[in-house]
């Protein structure tokens, strides 16, 4: 494949691009790196016939933005491929990148609609189970007002998206409660915590838990006893030395 040099101002992102702008990071730093060391990896583009816009970028949106920022030429590989093939290129390139589940979910929803394919076919294309695809697709079903409140969805999991969607459909109060806890969702609150926080607001009361659960007054669960074993929450940050010290003090007393 031949690498050519094109004007980034003559390019537009592919309508099915899967990377959101909040995941671009500092494109000015990337632009400076390209200025100093050159563009190591070319972008993939397809030709368009729409006036000043001559190409659509299939893979390489961040490099495109960096070159636009710094008024640099863009190295590209021009391809003549179908949308299915373009989707495969995009998916393959992003295998080595950290793309949020939100971005994947929105992109997969667009792919399914634009390509008019089944969930099973989409799962085959993406390379995951149909169950996982169904979870990803919940992202696009959630009311935009909730996402506007969250603002940055990079830490929201597909499982949490499913919970958010199902809660939002219960009532107007549930939807408003989700907007109220947008900051917690932004931080990556799990499904159980989201449901608990929403119920606290809607019902106007704290849910109670048995002594088997170790939690703070605000409802955050740190650990729980199961079969006489203490299991810590995945979100708990544990200093083992400090914990061992406290345990020793407890047993000595």
Image: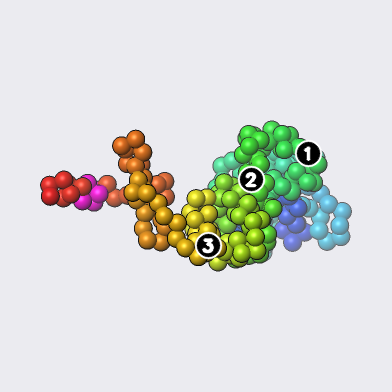
Q: Nearer the viewer, mark 1 or mark 3?
A: 3
Residue annotated with mark 3: 203
Rendering quarter of residue 124: top right
Q: For marks 1 and 3, give the CA distance.
A: 41 Å
Q: Residue at x 32, y 38 (%)?
A: 229
Quarter of the image for the N terminus: give it.
top right
Q: Residue at x 80, y 46 (%)?
A: 114
Q: Is residue 146 magenta?
A: no
Q: Secondary structure at mark 1?
A: loop
Q: Secondary structure at mark 3?
A: helix
Return the x and y of residue 115 as percentages of the image width and height: 80, 42
Residue annotated with mark 1: 117
Return the x and y of residue 96 as percentages of the image width and height: 56, 42
Give the total of numbered labels: 3
The residue lying toward the viewer, choosing from 237 and 143, is 143
Q: Is residue 66 left or right of residue 241?
A: right
Q: Secondary structure at mark 2?
A: helix
Return the x and y of residue 168 as percentages of the image width and height: 63, 57
Q: Residue at x 52, y 50 (%)?
A: 191
Question: What predominant SS class does the magenta segment belong to?
Answer: helix
* Category of crowding for the residue at label 2, using alpha-carbon neighbours closer than 10 angstroms: few (below 14), some (14–19), many (at least 20): many
Q: For marks 2 and 3, give the CA distance.
A: 29 Å
Which residues are drawn in magenta? Answer: 241-246
Farthest residue to the left: give it: 252
Q: Residue at x 71, y 47 (%)?
A: 109
Residue annotated with mark 2: 136
Q: Are marks 2 and 3 in contact (CB under 8 Å)?
A: no
Q: Which of the two labelled residues, at mark 2 and mark 3, occupies the earlier sequence position?
A: 2
């Amino acid at each position: 494949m031949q690498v050519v040099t094109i004007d980034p101002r003559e390019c537009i992102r592919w309508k099915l691009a899967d990377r959101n702008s909040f995941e671009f990071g500092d494109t000015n730093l990337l632009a400076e790196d390209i200025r100093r060391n050159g563009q190591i990896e070319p972008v993939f583009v397809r030709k368009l016939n729409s006036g000043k816009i001559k190409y659509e970028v299939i893979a390489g949106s961040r490099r495109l933005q960096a070159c636009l920022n710094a008024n640099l030429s863009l190295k590209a590989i021009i391809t003549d491929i179908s949308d299915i093939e373009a989707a495969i290129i995009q998916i393959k390139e992003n295998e080595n990148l950290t793309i949020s589940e939100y971005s994947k979910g929105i992109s997969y929803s667009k792919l399914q609609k634009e390509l008019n394919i089944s969930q099973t076919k989409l799962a085959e294309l993406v390379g995951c189970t149909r169950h996982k695809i169904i979870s990803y697709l919940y992202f696009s079903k959630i009311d935009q007002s909730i996402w506007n409140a969250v603002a940055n969805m990079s830490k929201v999991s597909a499982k949490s998206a499913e919970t958010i969607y199902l809660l939002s459909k219960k009532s107007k109060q549930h939807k408003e409660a989700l907007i109220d806890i947008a900051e917690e969702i932004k931080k990556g609150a799990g499904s159980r915590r989201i449901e608990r926080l929403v119920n606290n607001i809607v019902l106007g009361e704290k849910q109670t838990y048995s002594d088997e659960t170790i939690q703070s007054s605000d409802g955050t669960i740190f650990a729980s006893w199961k079969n006489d074993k203490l299991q810590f929450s995945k979100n708990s940050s544990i200093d083992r030395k400090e914990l061992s010290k406290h345990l020793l003090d407890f047993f000595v007393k």
